[in-house]
Amino acid sequence: MAQRNRYPGSRFDLTELGDRPLFHDWIIQPDNRSADGTVLTGTVYGHDKFPDGTGLTTSTVQAFDAAAGWAYCYSTGLVRLGRCQDPEGCANVDLM
């Protein structure tokens, strides 16, 4: 799967990906807080503000690459992606 990017041309520093929070059993869904966009909802591990196993929804997803295992969210920043709840849905993500 190719990288999806809400703002084409934006670049993201992935050098610290291994140190970022992990979203497991995640799904991507419409962002009900804004007119467009999507968010990730899943179980987070390794987040400095939430205990491991906490259910969490991110801010709007700016860029996404499920095959490479990462997403970049507006306020959350870079996150690692573990197992997706819906692998078929994960392969067909539209960030707009």
Image (spheres, grey):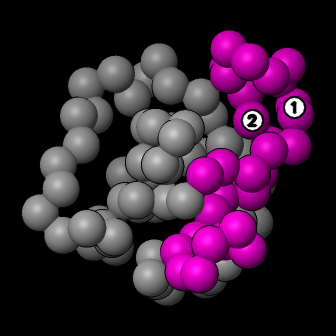
66 lies left or right of 58: left
Looking at the image, tell me whether mark 1 or mark 2 is earlier in sequence order.
2
User: What quarter of the picture does the N terminus occupy?
Assistant: bottom left
Against 19, is 40 above or below? below
Name the kind of residue labelled 1 in the image: Gly
Q: What's the residue at 12%, 63% (across, down)?
A: 9
| Quarter where residue 52 is shown | top right
**Is label 1 in a helix, a strand or a loop?**
loop
Q: Position of residue 15 (x, y in %)?
A: 25, 25
Q: Position of residue 5 (x, y in %)?
A: 30, 67
Q: Which portion, as a residue range, is magenta?
A: 31-59
**Is label 2 in a helix, a strand or a loop?**
strand
Q: Are marks 1 and 2 in contact (CB under 8 Å)?
A: yes
Number of marks present in the image shown? 2
**Residue position marked by numbered label 2 in the rendering:** 44
Q: Position of residue 63 (x, y in %)?
A: 37, 59
Q: What's the residue at 24%, 43% (across, down)?
A: 12
Against 64, is 82 above or below? above
52 lies left or right of 90: right
**Residue position marked by numbered label 1 in the rendering:** 53
Q: What's the residue at 45%, 76% (across, down)?
A: 95
Against 3, is 46 above or below? above
Q: Position of residue 43 (x, y in %)?
A: 80, 43
35 lies left or right of 65: right
24 lies left or right of 90: right
* Crowd class of label 2 (few under 14; some 14 to 19; many from 20; radius 10 Å): many
* Crowd class of label 1 (few under 14; some 14 to 19; many from 20; radius 10 Å): some
Task: Say the numbered circle drawn on residue 20.
Answer: none
